[in-house]
Image (cartoon, grey):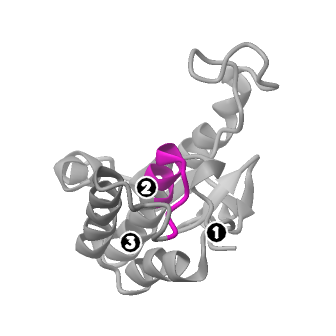
Amino acid sequence: MDAFLPAMERTGSRPRCVNVCSMAGKLGRYPPHMKQRFVGAVRDRDQDQLKRLVEDFIADVETDTYAQKGWPRQTYGISKAAEIASTFVAAEEYGHGENPIFVAACCPGWCRTDMAGPRAPKSAEEGADTPFWLACENSSVVGAMHKRFVQNRQELAWGE
C-alpha cells in the first residue's frame, strides 16, 4: 500500500483502499491456536507477524506437517485469511491522522468466472457491486465499513 500512498493522497477526498478477498478467508473453521495467531497480528498491528505466519505455513507445507499443526488444507483460504488480516492492520495504520485512508476487505461472492466456473450463482457484475460501493459511494453507511469485512453491502464476522 505504501507504493500507492502518494497517488492516494492527491485525490482531494478521503482516499480508499478496498481489498477483494473471499469468504474462504474467514477463521471459523480454524483451531483456536491458529485463529489467535491471525487475530493477534491484527491486534498488534503487525504486518511482519502476518508475514511470519504465512512463512510458517509455507515451511509446514514443505515439510508436510501443516495438517498436524492445525492448518486448514486450503492454500487459497490461508492466503485470503492473511489478506483480510493485512487489510485490518493497514486500516489501523493508515486510517487515522490528517488525511485518513478508508480501508476495507470484501468478498464478491461466488461469481461466474474462469476460476469459479459457469455454475456460480452470481455474475461478475453482481460480484462487483460491493467492491464498487465501498470504493465509490459517499455515505455514512460506507464510512462505517472502515476496517470491516463486507459482502452484499453487509459486515461479516471474520474471526468467528
Q: Which labelled disc corresponds to residue 83?
A: 2
Q: Which comes sooner in the sequence, label 2 or label 1?
A: 2
Q: Residue tagged by mark 1?
A: 144
**Quadrant of res 159:** bottom right
Q: Which comes sooner in the sequence, label 3 or label 1?
A: 3
As drawn, is 71 to the left or to the right of 27? Answer: left
Q: CA distance from mark 2 to mark 1?
A: 20 Å
Up-down relation of residue 69 to residue 119 (above or below): below
> Which of the two discs, 3 and 1, sits closer to the camera?
3
Up-down relation of residue 133 to residue 116 (above or below): below
Residue 17 in the image: x percent, y percent? 42, 51
Does the magenta-highlighted stretch encompass residue 88? no
Q: Which comes sooner in the sequence, label 2 or label 3?
A: 2
Q: Which labelled disc corresponds to residue 89?
A: 3
Residue 47 in the image: x percent, y percent? 28, 70
Q: Residues within 10 Å of mark 1 (few under 14, many from 20)?
A: few
